[in-house]
Amino acid sequence: MPLLNPGDLFPRLAISTTDGQALTIPDAFAGDFAVVLFNRGAWCPFCNAQLRAFERASATLAEKGIRVAALSVDDKETAAEMAAKNKLTFPVGYGADARAVARLTGAFVNPDPVYLQSTGFVLDPAGNIIVSVYSSGAIGRLVPDDVMGLVRYAREHAA
């Protein structure tokens, strides 16, 4: 399972969201910068904290043309409850096939129970990866301020 590196095109990943939408990444974010967050599940306090942080920053991210989506292996009901509890307004995907997602993206998979470890990608408006952050455990993840700084830098240094 190769890791995705800066400059790689993010692979097409179709997700179902808790609000009943079908989202294909990176196509759904064409023309905007995007953050794609894989989280361990509703049970993970670190994941909930990360998602809440992106929600708190959502207005500023939107002003800067940065869109966010999250994905986990949780079932629809669990993911929807987590999204409601955290008042998330960005798309929250559920029911990910952890091993299939790992084959596409290089994300680490916990073997038992099976779930995706925290993984984050920042995509440019063409769907290319600017940065990938892989974690093999509970910590080590993207934060909104770093994403905004990175996008600002990318815009300033666009060739």
Image: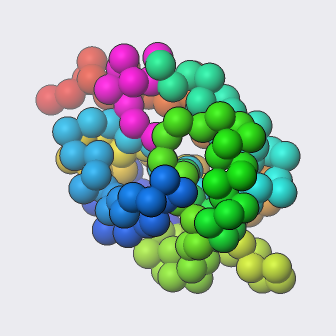
42 in relation to 108, above or below:
above
Task: Give the residue furthest to the left.
Answer: 159
- Residue drawn at x 67%, y 42% as measured from the top left: 84
On whether residue 39 falls in the magenta region, the answer is no
- Residue drawn at x 66%, y 70% as measured from the top left: 75
Extent of the magenta region: 60-68
Residue 85: where, in percent of width, then height? Answer: 74, 40
- Residue drawn at x 36%, y 50% as measured from the top left: 129
142 in relation to 121, above or below:
above
Query: Picture quarter containing residue 86?
Result: top right
16 in relation to 132, above or below:
below
Please name whichever residue, 90 or 12, is drawn nearer the observer in this view of the structure: 90
Quarter of the picture containing the C terminus is top left
Side of 99 where 42 appears, left or right: right
Query: Picture quarter containing residue 108?
Result: bottom right
Query: Picture quarter containing residue 27?
Result: bottom left
- Residue drawn at x 44%, y 75% as measured from the top left: 104
